[in-house]
Structure formats: C-alpha cells, structure tokens
Amino acid sequence: MSVPETTGSGKNGNSIVSFLQETRAELKKVTWPTRKELISNTIVVLIAVLLCAVLIWVIDAFFSGLFRLFMR
C-alpha cells in the first residue's frame, strides 16, 4: 500500500511564496526583547559562561595536580 506524499503543494513557486508569507506572519507574532532586556540578559549569559569556564579551569587544575602527584 503506497502512502501519498503530503509535504508540498506541487508548485514550487507557490509553495515558496506561501512559506515566506507564513514566515513573515509568524515573525510578527514574536515578542522581541527591549534593548534593556537584551543587554541585561547578555550580561547574565556572559557571567554564567565565565563562571563555568572558571569552574572547569579549577577542576582541571585540581586533577592535573593530583595526576602529577601520583606520577612521582
């Protein structure tokens, strides 16, 4: 038993135009952050990344020292 194809209207030109119209309509529904929210959220992300990097560095330094201790 064959299954009919359901992903496409058959006309490439029409489907592209339809896709772009739907994309534009969806982007109008998006609630974009204000400049102040964007800056504050960016700062939070940068601080979180910095803290993770420092934590990984500390753990790496600890295990490197532990490894050197065992290799003596």
Image: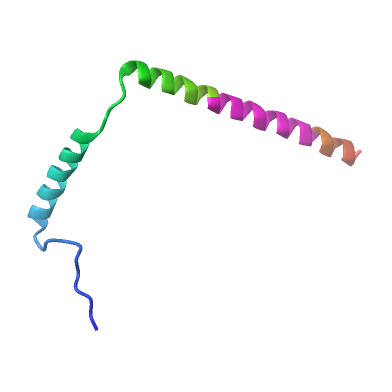
Q: Is residue 32 left or right of residue 58?
A: left
- The answer to which quarter of the image holds residue 31 is top left
> What segment is highlighted magenta in the picture?
48-64
Residue 67 horizontal side relative to residue 43, left or right = right
User: Residue 30: x and y, percent?
Assistant: 25, 33
Q: Is residue 27 left or right of residue 34?
A: left
Where in the figure is residue 59, as x and y percent of width and height? 72, 33
Task: Give me the residue at 54% from left, 28% from top.
Answer: 49
**Above or below for 40 versus 9:** above
The residue positioned 66% from the left and 29% from the top of the image is 55
Rendered location of residue 19, percent (x, y): 16, 48
Question: Is residue 60 found inside the magenta-colored segment of the image?
Answer: yes
In the rendered view, how is the structure colored? rainbow
Write down the quadrant of residue 41 in the picture.
top left
Q: How many marks?
A: 0
Location of residue 61 with respect to 4 vertically, above or below? above
Please give the name of the residue rendered at 66% of the width and 32% of the height, measured from the top-left corner: 56
Residue 71 falls in which quadrant of the image?
top right
Residue positioned most to the bottom: 1
Quadrant that contains the C terminus:
top right
Horizontal arrangement in the rendering, residue 28 relative to residue 33 (left or right): left
Q: Position of residue 58 (x, y in %)?
A: 71, 28
Q: Does the stretch in magenta take in 14?
A: no
Identify the residue at the far right of this view.
72
